[in-house]
Amino acid sequence: MNDTPVGDEPDPSPAVPERLSQIHEFLLFCDHYKRIERRNSLTDGSRRENDAEHTWHMALYALLLKDEIGADVDIAHVLAMILTHDLVEIHAGDTFAYDTAGREGQAAREEEAATQLFGMLPDDLRDRVWSWWREFESGDTAEARFARALDRLQAFGQNVRSGGLDHRENGVSRTMTFGRMRPARQADEAIRLLVDRLYAEADRQPGYWLPDGKP
Amino acid sequence: MNDTPVGDEPDPSPAVPERLSQIHEFLLFCDHYKRIERRNSLTDGSRRENDAEHTWHMALYALLLKDEIGADVDIAHVLAMILTHDLVEIHAGDTFAYDTAGREGQAAREEEAATQLFGMLPDDLRDRVWSWWREFESGDTAEARFARALDRLQAFGQNVRSGGLDHRENGVSRTMTFGRMRPARQADEAIRLLVDRLYAEADRQPGYWLPDGKP
């Protein structure tokens, strides 16, 4: 923090280091994240949510559930992964979880998007963001498993609280959700309880679930 | 993490501890945060941004600027404050930075909102979220000063990149922004450089600023 007083009138040509300008431009560009629409709705069903909203919500889940799970996780690391986990969608777009055809080219599309997007940053930060993203994608650490489980839990909560609108509109039956929710339910007992709590809530609503095989 | 295998079929009546249900309900309720509209726009000027988008963006700023500032901050703590800093607006609404009348009752409105909202959580978590919010509001620690500076920097970036639309629509002149930007510019040299970089960008655009005294 500064020791010299700073006047109110801004410096007309501030000597901003190239590194700092690069980070700033990246941050300003990431505003696009707010325009990437996901398949799930707000809980009042009024509109779909976007990546920025989903990501903030996941981060709040992490903050408030970290001490409820069995594993001891580094929350700063979890949050770093969460905050950047879908950034590549700025270029690659959101791929719907149940869109098998769309998911085929997804990895290549996202790798290219990462090169383009993270490449805006100074090399060290580019590598750091890239490694958070890779770790999240791989799900190999306790932190990544927790973050991935929250990705599923948050989306499922949005679906169930909006009355299953998105499940039905997207032709997703109850059985179809099992594969999607498996990693979340297997990651941790507390998360399994919350996922099952949501299933119980959905199951109580007549007509919530599409019949199997009739998408 | 579990040692026993978990089948795909959810438990029809999971034994969810009351504490966990409370946290879950709080998290689901916080979906409302995505519907609190702010006064500043997305950078393409297409619409106003909401609290969830603003908060995710601020958190990303923190993550990528933490090693660029002079102070050594605990990033987990910074992120905890940022992720929860405007939650009270779910009940109290967004108070426009330049709305002097609106700001008068703001503190009391927000304190009441905090009681209602944070009170949904188990006591220990209620107290923790409350203390993050209080610390952010007071701006007394290096972490809070950094978080508060980012609050201003992010909003100013949105305003400038959207061509000053919000400054003009809200009757905000260049001089009027000085008081608002002062804590950000005084908090840290790197942040001052980025704020001044945005002023320089705004100043280059003819007609960006409203004349003083003619809101």
Image: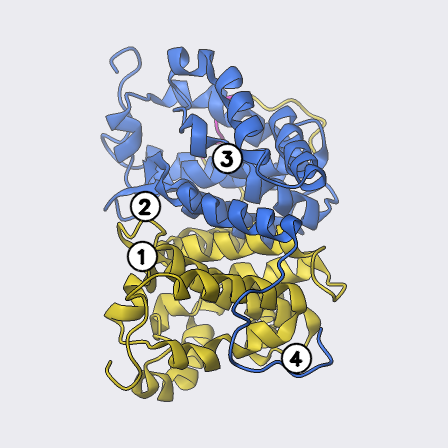
Chain colours: A blue, B yellow
- Mark 2 closeness class: few <14, some 14–19, many ≥20 residues within 10 Å: many
Callout in the foreground (1, 3)? 3
Q: Position of residue B141 (x, y in %)?
A: 69, 75
| Disc 2 residue type (three-letter) | Leu
Task: Look at mark 4 in the image and give the residue it sits on.
Answer: B140
Q: Element at badge 3?
A: loop
**Residue at image point 44% right, 57% down:** B54
Is the C-beta separation of discs 1 and 2 under 8 Å?
yes
Callouts 2 and 4 close, C-beta under 8 Å? no
Query: A48 or A190: nearer the eye?
Result: A48
Residue B34: x %, y % from top left = 36, 54
Name which of mark 1 and mark 4 comes first in the sequence.
1
Q: Can residue B101 be seen in this view?
A: yes
Principal SS element in the magenta part? loop
Of discs 2 and 4, which sits in the foreground?
4
The verdict on a common chain for dots 1 and 3 is: no
Q: Distance between the residues labelled 2 and 4?
A: 35 Å
Instruction: Find the magenta span and give its range.
Output: B8-12
Tag 3 residue? A86
Q: Name the residue under label 2.
A: A42
Amino acid tagged 4? Asp
Report if the CB atoms under discs 2 and 3 are less than 8 Å apart. no
* Residue ID at (35%, 79%): B98
